Amino acid sequence: MIAALLRQEVRALLRARRTRLAVGIVLYAVLGAPFLLAKPPPHVAEAAATWFSGDDPAFSLFLFIWTDLALNKLSAILGVVLAGGIIREEQARGLLPLLWAKPITRTEYYLVKLAAAAIVFTLLIGGAGLLGLALFPWQIAGFRAGPFLVVSGVHLVGALFAVTFSGALAVLIRRRLGAMLTSLMVLMLLVGGAFLGFYNPAWADYTVVNPFSHAVWLLGHLDDLSAATVVRPLLVLLAIHAATITLGALAVRRVEA
Amino acid sequence: MTAAIELDALTKSFGDVLAVDRVSFTVPEGQVFGFMGHNGAGKTTAIRMLLGLTRPTSGAARVLGRDIVEDSLEVRRLSGFLPASYGLPRDMSALDFLVYVGAMFGLSRADATARARGLLDLFELGAVARKSLGGFSTGMAQKVGLAQALIGRPRVLFLDEPTSGLDPLGRHKFLTHIRGLARDEGTTVLFSTHILSDVESICERVAVMHHGRLIASGGLAELKATRRAASMDDLYLDLVQEAA
């Protein structure tokens, strides 16, 4: 039953107007990245050269622009767009009693909605990566597909926090707009602080609870993309996701139909 | 006569407000049972408890022998529900919405689609199955509402004020469908309404609520005879005036 419902939920979300808007944002981000790289702000170029290891500063700069200026901001917005109205949208329409009178628990319903949002988010961000993979070799000098995929893949796992967090706040905060704005503000703050550990290594400890810092952690280890290096941020991110999903799943039990 | 729904001193309070006060009655299987009372009488709260949408403060109830608290999922698997007011998802087509609800009952996509198409044809909505629900009239939306309540082939159907907002012809057709469900498929229907003529036209037995309390229950003809009421209006007014 859950699998069948998840399929229907993903279909419905893919056809929703807001997903079409999201596709437009993704295209804008992918197509805009090379333009940013063509003439990066001097402080960005300087930061990339100083912060990241690697024998190819130009490629590091590209990955910095791709993850920070494109993917990070994109993820924060998409997470809120896709998951920020979970449950509350149906509640506002008066549809919850009709749906929750079906043979499914509230927790199952919430998890299905969250999983559908995560799948569509993955399709969009993953699609952005694949589109980049097709376009960037022609546009970016010294582009390397392997590190690009590994960095983008780990970033995607981290960026899913935007979905799990927005979903949790949607059930924790009664008013839909309030929940969405709070999610967006917090996610933008986290995105803004993602590179704090690179900016000042002494502050790295403060970023331990920031999923976006773990999502971009590999940028500092481009010379050593071994399995152990890649697994480290993934484990931390999975733990953060588990905690956020559990929080939302517990909170949804208190929502009145 | 087997009981499809049994309420035993079912009670729900919200703080100091007693919404449903020790209500007990039995709904026989395969009948359309009128659940009457003015707005705010406690009908919706009672139905919400039966479907596990809100927990009873005290008392108990069973649907087809299943406890509504301990075995809520099974109760909901056997039930269909049409709430009093709801907004259908405007982005979805009628067919997609019914298939979505069908998935909640564990139907495969093929089964849910076949069942949804059958119901849409039954309610004369086959031609607009692929149209967005946002453009549906009140009557069409209500038919989709009834179709979603029937998609899991329920043995018990809870209808909360289902004819409010329908025009006379739409109401007549709707009531005909409900009567047919009980007669042809043996579905038990708990029909909550404050429209007395609807009750008179399709219900054999009724329960009457007033300010959270049950003030009468039994066979409609029997209640009328006991109260010497010529019409449903007379019966209802007599009961309410006595309870006030």
Image (cartoon, coloured by chain):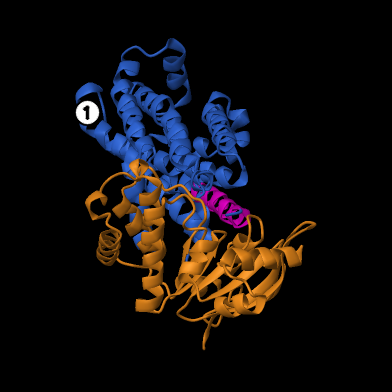
Farthest residue toward the right?
A: B16
Residue A45 at x, y = what percent?
Answer: 41, 16
Would you name the residue on which mark 1 appears?
A: A135
* Residue A68 visible to the viewer: yes
What element does badge 1 sit on?
helix
Q: Residue at x 30, y 66 (%)?
A: B108
Image quadrant of residue A203?
top right
Rendered blue, the chain in question is A
Instruction: Judge by depth and name the residue closer to the eye, B74 or B156.
Output: B156
Question: Left or right of A19: which side holds A134?
Answer: left
- Magenta stretch containing residue A242, yes or no? yes
Q: Residue at x 44, y 31 (%)?
A: A72
Indicate the chain on which mark 1 is placed.
A
Image quadrant of residue B194?
bottom right
* Residue B159 visible to the viewer: no
Residue B77 at x, y = what percent?
Answer: 45, 71
Question: Left or right of B46: which side holds A21?
Answer: left
Instruction: Judge by depth and name the residue closer to the eye, A46 or B182.
Output: B182
Instruction: Judge by depth and name the residue closer to the eye, A201 or B110.
Output: B110
Residue A223 at x, y = what percent?
Answer: 38, 35
Label 1 packing within 10 angstroms: few (<14), some (14-19), many (20+):
some
Instruction: Judge by depth and name the residue closer to the eye, B97 or A138.
Output: B97
Seen in the picture, residue B196 relative to A21 is either above or below; the reply is below
Q: What is chain B's hue in the picture?
A: orange
Question: Left or right of A136: which side holds A116?
Answer: right
Magenta region, residue range: A237-255
